[in-house]
Image (cartoon, rainbow, N blue to C red):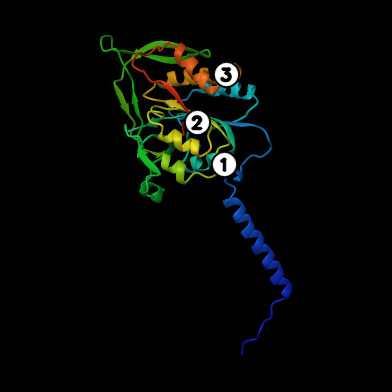
Amino acid sequence: MKAKTFANPKSFVFVSIVAAAFIASIFFIQNNPENEISVYDDGIPRAVIIDQLYDEIPNPYFHQKATEYLEGAGYQVDIFTTENVTVDFYKNLPSMNYKFIVVRTHGASTHSSDSVTLFTGERYQEDKYISEQLFGSVKRGAPLQVTMYNASVGTVNAWIVVNETYKEMSIPFNQEIQTTDDYFLVTPKLVDEMMVGKFPDSIMLLGGCNTMEYPSLAKSLIKRGASTVVGWDNTVGDMENDIILLQVLEETLVNNREIKNAVDLVMESYDWGNPHYDAKLKYYSKGNV
C-alpha cells in the first residue's frame, strides 16, 4: 500500500511566487526588445575591431591606428581576429553593446540583392549549422583574391607598410589566387532571424568587397539597431580598404565629422593608386529604411 503524502501549504505559496516571477520576466523581455541583456553595462562606450583577414592578410598597423583613434574618442576597444570570427560570434554581436564596429573582412555578392554576405573565419563543415544552411541564414564560400598586374612588364603594384607608412612597390605578378578553403558566410537572413539582442545605435564600417553593392545587409543591420552602415559597392584591394577606413576613422573620431561627411570627404579626396579598383564607399542610415 502506498503512503499518502501531503504537501506543505507554504511550498505552494513559494512555488506560486517563483512561477509568477518567471512569467513576469518572460513578459518583460518579450515586450522590451531594447532591454536585451548586454555583456557590458558599466556606461563605458565600447568599440570593436573584427578582423577576419588577420590570419591571411595581417595588418598590425591598422589595429594600432584604429585603436588609437577609437581610444582617443573615449571608447574601450576590443579586437577579435580570424579564429574568433565565427557564425555564433555574429549571432551574439548585437548583445555585446558595441557602439562603434569596424569590420575588416572579405565580402561577397553574386550580383543579387539578397546575396550580400560577410565572411566568417570559420571553416565550412557540411554537418555544422545544418538548419542555418537549410534556411539560407549561412552560406558557403571561398574568397577570391585577385592580384592585378601589368602584362607588359610582368609586375604588380602593391601597397606595403614600411615604418608605419604605406609605400607602393613592384613585385612579380600573379594573375589570380583562389583559396582552397571554404568558409561560412553570414547573410541578411541571419541578421533578421538569428541575431540576439539589438545594436545600441551602432556605427558599422564593413571593410569588405561588395558589402554595399546592394543595401540588403545594411537594411537588416539597421533594423537590428545600427544607426549607420558603411560599405563598398564593388571590389576593393585590401590595402586600399585599410587606408580609406583609417582615413574615415580619423575624420570621424579625431576631426569630429559626421560619419556621412567623413565618407564623402575621404572619397572625394582619395587618389587611387591602383586604377583597377573603382569601388565607392557608401553609407546607409536609419533615415533610408
Residue 163 lies left or right of residue 13; in this view the side is left
User: Could you tell me which residue is drawn at 38 percent across and 20 percent down?
Assistant: 279
Q: Residues within 10 Å of mark 2 (few under 14, many from 20)?
A: few
**Residue 25: image location, x then y, percent:** 63, 55
Q: Quadrant location of residue 43? A: top right
Residue 158 lies left or right of residue 59; in this view the side is left
User: Could you tell me which residue is drawn at 25 percent across and 9 percent down?
Assistant: 152
Q: Residue furthest bottom?
A: 1
**Amino acid found under the numbered disc labelled 1:** Ser
Residue with the mark numbered 3: 257
Mark 3 or mark 1: whose residue is earlier in sequence: 1
Determine contact: label 1, label 2, CB under 8 Å: no
Q: Residues within 10 Å of mark 3 (few under 14, many from 20)?
A: some
**Amino acid found under the numbered disc labelled 3:** Arg
Quarter occupied by the N terminus: bottom right
Determine contact: label 3, label 2, CB under 8 Å: no
Q: CA distance from mark 1 to mark 2?
A: 23 Å
Q: Residues within 10 Å of mark 1 (few under 14, many from 20)?
A: many
Mark 3 or mark 2: whose residue is earlier in sequence: 3
Circle 1 SS class: helix
Work out whether 198 lies above or below 213.
below
User: Could you tell me which residue is drawn at 36 percent across and 18 percent down?
Assistant: 278
Q: Residue furthest top?
A: 153
Determine contact: label 3, label 1, CB under 8 Å: no
Residue 95 numbered mark, or none: 1
Q: CA distance from mark 3 to mark 1?
A: 27 Å
Mark 1 or mark 2: whose residue is earlier in sequence: 1
Residue 287 numbered mark, or none: 2
Residue 36 lies left or right of residue 280; in this view the side is right
**Amino acid found under the numbered disc labelled 2:** Gly
**Residue 242: image location, x then y, percent:** 47, 21
